[in-house]
Amino acid sequence: MYVILVYDMGEKRVAKMLKLCRRYLNWIQNSVFEGEISEGRLKKLKFEADEIMEDKDSLIIFTSKVNHGLHKEVIGCERQTIDQFL
Amino acid sequence: MKKNYYLFNPGRLSRKDNTLKFSPSPVDGQEVSPRYLPVEEVDSLYVYGALDANSSLYNFLGKHDVAVHFFDYYENYTGSFAPKKVLLSGKMLVAQTQLYLNDTKRLDLAQRCLDGAAHNMLKNLQYYDRRDKDMEPFITPMKALQEEIWHSKNIKSLMGVEGNIRKHYYDAFNLIINDHVMGIRTKQPPLNIVNSLISFGNMMCYSECLRSIMKTQLEPTISFLHEPGDRRYSLSLDLSEIFKPLLVDRVIFKMLNKRVLQERDFDLYMNRVVMKDAGKKKFVAAIEKRMTETIKHRQLQRSVSYKHLIKLECYKLQKHILGIQTYEPFKMWW
């Protein structure tokens, strides 16, 4: 499935969260990730995120069964492309 | 589904924060910002450019079951880094060897493979026949040859039939592709644009098949149609026969006829043709897109991608080898 993940963490935990999300998804902007992920691995990600989080931290995941039908428009500079060619 | 990543630009790949970090080499003295790849969603890496890496990275890749395929400047496949094989099965290996040693059983399986390949090649021609290109002169002899597959007495004569089918098939390319001439099939090195595309595409198909075989219990060096020679994974050659027409050839036709790939995407040397980086990227992107396209599988009654189809083919082979179910090659029905 295709997901967009955003988080808002306390200053001390924000780097931890960044490192965790980088393992599963593509970073596109500060605190924002997107990418294709399997259901099982998403569960794993949520579990690991839960370990890091403390009260008042927030994590939001938008999921979509398919990635078409989801339109993406970048205005201004694109911080990071997510294609498969490096 | 896990993704393949293609590394064209020089740079350093390293393990960082338990994931992969690619730092491109500076361009004109300017640092380029690094890119992080989500290691959990990476299937294989295809390295076409110069890559710096150390053993700690390979340890890490091995743990996460990521394969790395290397290609030289002339697009030849030079080798792979393969993670430790976890799906080992002595039973499977013995059964596969036994089947290979039994001449009648081996011939039968090879015939089945080739029948599937011929069928898919014919489907390609029929597709263009419906689009006002007269393919009859190629289709008729190919159909006759397809019948002959079942009359061949040994592998050698079967390979002869295969060669003849392929000759007619490649002859048809001249008619299908509008602005380019294919002439005869030349490899090592390919001498014109069409040939260079076929070589490059086949190689991609070959490494994709190899990757699928590695995910199953099959032994990639013991093949049935091709002679299991040394120094190559010949089972993936068998398997790629079936998928080359639908994964590679169709993409080539489309990209040349729609003029997505043009002469300027190639370096035309005196005695070999090599794709430029821009051309490679376009072509790889197209094949990659094709791999993720899905079809409704008739037996499974659900959508499967072409990539997954290759793996399903491996499962069918396994079943055949273990005597559970007779192998029926994948045949295009559209």
Image (cartoon, rainbow, N blue to C red):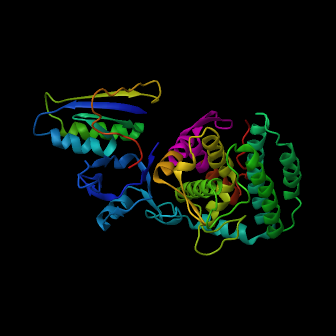
With respect to residue B186, does B179 lie above or below? Answer: above
User: In the rendered view, does B113 fall on the left or right side of B63?
Assistant: right
Number of numbered markers: 0
Residue occupying image coordinates x 60% and y 68%: B221
With respect to residue B110, does A15 lie above or below? Answer: above
User: In the rendered view, does B145 fall on the left or right side of B78?
Assistant: right
Residue occupying image coordinates x 23% and y 45%: A19
Q: Residue farthest to the bottom?
A: B230
The spot of residue B60 in percent (x, y) is 33, 60
Residue B180 drawn in magenta: no
Quarter of the image with the C terminus of chain B is top right
The spot of residue A20 in percent (x, y) is 25, 44
User: In the rendered view, does B283 fall on the left or right side of B165?
Assistant: left
With respect to residue B6, does B155 lie above or below? Answer: below
One can see residue A38 in this view:
yes
The spot of residue B301 in percent (x, y) is 64, 33
Residue toward you, B98 or A20: A20
Magenta-highlighted residues: B284-311
With respect to residue B148, does B258 lie above or below? Answer: above
Q: In which quarter of the image is residue A63?
A: top left
Q: Residue farthest to the front?
A: B270
Residue toward you, B125 or B229: B125
Q: Quadrant of residue B92?
A: bottom right
One can see residue B322 in this view:
no
Residue B306 drawn in magenta: yes
The spot of residue B287 in percent (x, y) is 55, 46
